[in-house]
Image (cartoon, rainbow, N blue to C red):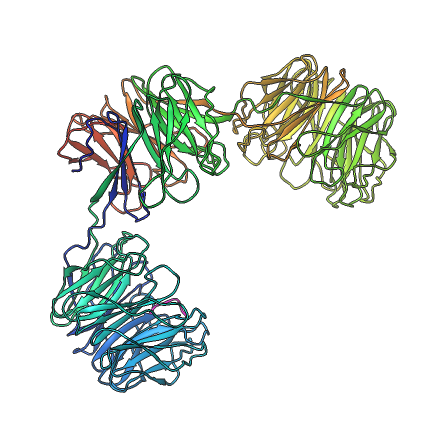
Amino acid sequence: MYSTGSYSLISVAIGDLNKDHRLDIVVVNNDTGSINILLGQYEGFLNQTNYPTGSYPQSVAAGDFNNDTRPDIVVANWRSNDVSVLLGYGNDSFAKETRYSVGYDPQSVAVGDFNNDTRLDIVVVNSESNDVSVLLGHGNGSFAKETRYSVGSYPSSVAVGDFNNDTRLDIVVANYGSNYVSILLGYGNGSFAKETNYSVGSNPKSVAIGDFNNDTRLDIVVAHVGSNNVSVLLGYGNGSFAKETRYLVGSSPQSVAVSDFNNDTRPDIAVANRASNDVSVLLGYGNDSFAKETRYSVGISPSSIAVGDFNNDTRLDIVVANEWSNDVSVLLGYENGSFAKETRYLVGSNPQSVAVGDFNNDTRLDIVVANPRSNDVSVLLQYNRGAIAYKMAYASGGGSSLQCVVVGDLNNDTNVDIVLANYGTNKVGILFGYGNGRFENQIMLSTGINSHPTLIAIGDFNGDSVVDIAVVNYGTKQVGMMLGYGNSTFASQTSEGSSFDSRPLAMVSGDLNNDKRSEIAITYDGRDNVDIFVAYNRWPFTKETKYSVGSSPKSVAVGDFNNDTRLDIVVANYGSNYVSILLGYGNGSFAKETNYSVGSYPSSVAVGDFNNDTRLDIVVANEWSNDVNVLLGYGNGSFAEQTNYSVGSYPQSVAVSDFNNDTRLDIVVANLGSKDVSVLLGYGNGSFAKETRYLVGSNPQSVAVSDFNNDTRLDIVVANVGSNAVSVLLGYGNGSFAELTRYLVGYSSSSVAVGDFNNDTRLDIVVAHAGSNNVSVLLGYGNGSFSEETRYSVGSRPQSVAVGDFNNDNRLDIVVVNSGSNDASVLLGYGNGSFAKETNYSVGSQPYSVAVGDFNNDTRLDIVVANYRSEDVSVLLGYDYIVFVKQMMLKTGNSSRPQSLVISDFNNDGLMDIGIVNSVTHSIGIFLGYGNISFANKATYSTRPYLSPCGMAVGDFNNDTQVDIVFNSCNSDTVGVFLGYGNGSFGNVVPYSTGSRHCHRDF
């Protein structure tokens, strides 16, 4: 147990605070107003576990020989003239050895893929037969019969690398008896060329490779027993090498390794010196030269050396096998190339060789040693007991009354940060981490007067891939939100969303509907339910800005008319027989209007590129002259004179699309007087064919286009003001259409728009009803037919409707302008086909038309409205004011009293589920999620009558990749574990005694 010096531990969180792959603990002390940080400690290695091998094992290496992602071991057995392969189970144990014959007196072993088949092979040097044996792997843990290649006299060491940059592995051998190294270039098919020899010092015992001069060509370093030095041979990159350069080391160097010990990206050298009982470290300058050696004492007769990061501090450490003290020495590195004093661990008899690998898949390196005298290998696994090294305290200030702590990366620097709820000072505190277990001074964010924050959760609540903070403010009975900017700063808290009556006990966050945004779930004191809250943009638009246009503006559209990447506005002025162009400045403001004459009483306007010159053009429907005008754009914001095309009687609405799939835009017009639509097929040069008409019903007022039956052919929908219906004409893809299908809707259907309101990839319809002051939503089935309408109230005499995602939640919303109440109604969508209650925004007098676009390039949609009576347009800019809104309630059962909850995927369907602990009914409850913020009925699992659960957490406790649950009991010194089956169900509870009775929900 570890003392924190406090009698009131109110909250705890865990995370890897110093990036050493060990979990650390953050504890909140309510009485002292401080937090304690307890860092997970490197403890060294467990006692050895020995595995039999052949006779007199001399060398060991590790690799994955059967492609199961678990390290295996290969051992060269000197007396039995074979190698032993021990396949790893990945749980710290190994299968019984399998042996393969090699040459006489095998001395050293290495692994590599010599035939480029993605299966590891083995190479062994045979000191008595003066050759190397190559055993090609089958990828299942077995190997082909050896193939031998002659080398020098008494070869003692082997290493593998690509010396001629042909992407094929080559072999280098140190020949103890002939004082040279042999290079065998690989053909990439498992065979090798004849040796090429290079002279080195006396009695070369060990060889390693590295790029010592940063020229991307591999070099060689050799340790010489007879001359007490190492030789460096620089590679030319073609398989040949320069003459050696020697560096003094200790007495009788036996083994050499290469790594970057001081993190300067330049390889360094470490040598085990048998006679002087030490290791020499030579730091590299990166220009093929090295600093003078620094020595570190180890055990008696060090015979082999290997390198790895044993304490996960990103600094390389050294391990040495000591032959005559029967142990290994571990020297931890300090990043500047120096090392701590050795720590020794007993192994077998006369250890000759050492290698490293993660043999139990715990992300911590382990050690394997070959012991000749005891004919076995020793495996030393790192401790994994959760020991705590030391603690640090961070004061939060007087009167803070800390309540809750969570950890996460709040500023995208990959370092874990800490967030605190300061109940007494009405603030959220943030300590940004340095990634080494230490933190900056606390930054305070106000939650408001008498807010008293008690609970915190973090997540991405607005879909910008930046972490935000959710806060339960007990004093104001609201859930607040602080949106993150990703740079260590946060927006001021918003909290005008949902409120609550009972005291919240626990809050968690997670993406419950797969929309890339986090939701939150809350449990309450004395309540039998869980509430789900969703983040919504409550007031997404600024106050209007007005711009004068012509007389009686009746229709508005948007487009970039001067190719400056800034949206502009075009308005059809019914009373003055011209269109007004307002060029945008890209900041939400617009230039003064420029006017272009059109026909008599223009009623509708649309935009498109009709002559395929990448410049937007304009089409206008003229009510009294029974025609449409096309104005071709010059791309600089100005337009050519109009061209006229006859259509039906009293045209009211115009839309643009490609109806015959010829990549040329066509025109469709709704004709109020002739009860039809006119389709004008485009030639792609700005001119159009004569109209073709299709009957659509009484008084068509508005037209829209989309593909309603998913056949890649565009269809038409018309709102019929006279018959209280919408008419759908399915397209054949050749510019012609089927007969209409009619759907009854509300009174006086004035406008229609299209969008996918329930995210099912099928298009839906929304219709505005001027006579009944509402809008109808008809959900599409994807086959051209639609469901019955669902109505939503809006303002008085709605005239025009448009759709867009106004709060950036990936769910389509609706905007309607109401000519009777002089406002715009915004209905935010839930993404399931239903909508929130309207929010109204004042605009000009008698608004007749609405369009949407991003006028200030802030990635938020804005609204433009044409006001018929006040002869202007209103621009409403979108902005973020996101709050939490209660979406649904999950009942947990009578007198269940849920105390804590978690969000996780219990059934491996990629959808988030909810788990709760019920303190009174002694159970846990599981709500499996459908991915749309709805859930299956609760499944209940008993925690046993004598265990009253109050806190819970999840993890994989039996390494079966399935999520398990652990809870703590409030009335006993016990925790209980439910092992998950991965299908959403769990086994019976398994209790474990803790020896201490301490209850807290923040488990």
Q: Camera-side residue: 442 or 868?
A: 442
Compared across the picture, whether 598 is left or right of 169 comes to right
* Residue found at x 50% / y 36%: 464
Q: Residue 161 placed where, x, y %?
A: 38, 72
264 vs 126: above or below: above
| Residue depicted at 31% across the width and 27% down the height | 397
Q: Main secondary structure of the magenta part?
A: loop
Q: Give whichever of 467, 128 is nearer the camera.
A: 467
Q: Look at the image and give the residue range highlighted in magenta.
A: 115-121
Residue at left offset 15%, top offset 70%: 323
Q: Please check the rendered image and state whether residue 119 is part of the magenta-colored stretch, yes or no.
A: yes
- Dividing the picture into quadrants, the one containing residue 4 is top left
Residue 137 appears at what percent x and percent y? 33, 70
Image quadrant occupied by the C terminus: top left
Relative to 706, 243 lies left or right? left
Q: Is residue 389 visible?
A: yes
> How far across and down, in percent of the image, does residue 684 sit?
80, 44
How many numbered callouts? Answer: 0
Evaluate whether residue 789 shows in this view.
no
Lateral position of residue 621 relative to residue 732, left or right: right
Most foreground residue, 808 or 89: 808
